[in-house]
Amino acid sequence: MKPKRTILCVDDNEQALSIRKVMLETRGYRVVTSTSGEEALRRFQEGGIDLLLTDLIMPGIDGSKLIEAVKAISPQTPAILLSGRIRICDRETQADVFLPKGMYAPAELLERVRVLLVRKRGPKRMQPQAERSAARSSVA
């Protein structure tokens, strides 16, 4: 069984956070939640996070600054930025994907998460020809 990918989900709105957590867990992801950017950054520094999914507008460290801090620690960690207040992210951000809340279907979010995690892991490697031949001959 392949290990579950871990998503750090951040939103100061606990109801929205809970809905996203359930949606991601039912698709087989491990979800760690946080209601503040500061708490999320501490949790990320502990390690084991494969993707960051964060709200933009939050008190303290907002989503954009959180992504900046995460990318400074781990540039390869994918990040999705969500916002219910703005429809187009016009400021500079290091997010891999921006989605306006309420303007996307849950299936779109799940697909974006899947694609970013596959991209982080990289394409599946083919076995070299010699290894495949050896494996076949030892089975026969």
Image: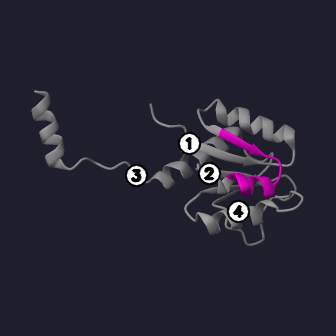
Please indicate whether residue 36 sits to the left or right of residue 112 in the image.
Answer: right
The amino acid at mark 2 is Leu
**Residue 50: x and y, percent?**
58, 50
Q: Is disc 2 placed on a helix, strand or loop?
A: strand
Name the N-terminal-most of marks 4 and 1: 1
Disc 3 designates what residue?
123
**Residue 81: x and y, percent?**
73, 56
Disc 1 designates what residue?
5
Name the N-terminal-most of marks 3 and 2: 2
Does residue 56 belong to the magenta stretch? no
Name the N-terminal-most of marks 3 and 4: 4
Q: Is residue 99 something that shows in the picture? A: no
Give the numbered dot on residue 51.
Answer: 2
State the extent of the magenta-drawn residues as a range.
31-43
> Do labels 1 and 2 touch, CB within 8 Å?
yes
Please tell me which residue is depicted at 54% across the width and 37% down the height of the picture: 4
Q: Is disc 3 placed on a helix, strand or loop?
A: loop
Q: Is residue 77 something that shows in the picture? A: yes
Residue 94 higher or lower than 114, as above or below: below
Please tell me which residue is depicted at 56% across the width and 52% down the height of the picture: 116
The amino acid at mark 4 is Ile
Whole-Å distance between the Cαs marked 3 and 4? 25 Å
Name the N-terminal-most of marks 3 and 1: 1
Disc 4 designates what residue?
67
The amino acid at mark 3 is Pro
* CA neighbours of label 1 inside 10 A, class few (<14), some (14 to 19), many (20+): some
